Amino acid sequence: MENVLGLIKLRIKKGSNLKACDTRTSDPYVFVTMAEQQLRTSVAKDTLNPEWNEELTLYVKDVNIPILVTVTDKDTFTPDDNMGDAEIDLKPYLQCVKMGLRDMAEGHIVKQIQPDRTNCLSEGSNCIWKNDKLIQEMTLRLRNAKHGEITVEIGWVTLPDSKGLSQVQF
């Protein structure tokens, strides 16, 4: 793939306090979009607090393009219901990756990102050293919904012969 900087491993961990679309419950799944890429998780049946713990892989060509996650209720006879969405801004995490850190202490916090009007974070998020790599864990509040959050984790994979982040300006 031409012009690919690397890969993002996106782990969709869980949802919490999601909207009930089917009487008192929902059958949620997560639809992920980044530029022309579209992926989705499996459907979690009859729950407002699903646990997916599924890993999706996206290629990155432009660090300025966010990942859009949309939580959707699966319906059988009618169109699926939108339960809310959130964006993941990759730039704070990728700035840490670009530092090229190695051999950090397990759990070492490299950067803290606070929630504000420019992101969907519901609480502070950390870029941390975990299992010999840098990851960012975050809980995102869903937009276009009265309530609901989704917890995700992102990690970077450098591809052999890719451009990487060395020439990227943040």
Image (tube, helix red, strand yellow):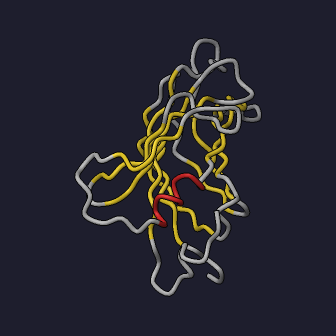
* 92 relative position to 110: left or right: right
Q: Pick whichever, 53 or 143, lies toward us.
A: 143
| Visible residue check, residue 40 | yes
Q: Residue at x 40, y 68 (%)?
A: 100
| Visible residue check, residue 151 | no
**Residue 157 rendering spot, x and y as whole percentages:** 44, 68
Count of numbered badges drawn on the protein? 0
**Residue 102: quadrant of the picture:** bottom left
Q: Would you place residue 59 above or below residue 105 in this image? A: below
For this orientation, the residue located farthest to the top is 24
Q: Residue at x 51, y 54 (%)?
A: 93
**Residue 70 rendering spot, x and y as whole percentages:** 66, 40
Q: Residue at x 71, y 23 (%)?
A: 145
**Residue 62 rendering spot, x and y as whole percentages:** 68, 67
Q: Would you place residue 50 above or below residue 52 in this image? A: above
Q: Pick whichever, 116 or 38, lies toward us.
A: 116
Q: Residue at x 45, y 53 (%)?
A: 55
**Residue 133: quadrant of the picture:** bottom left
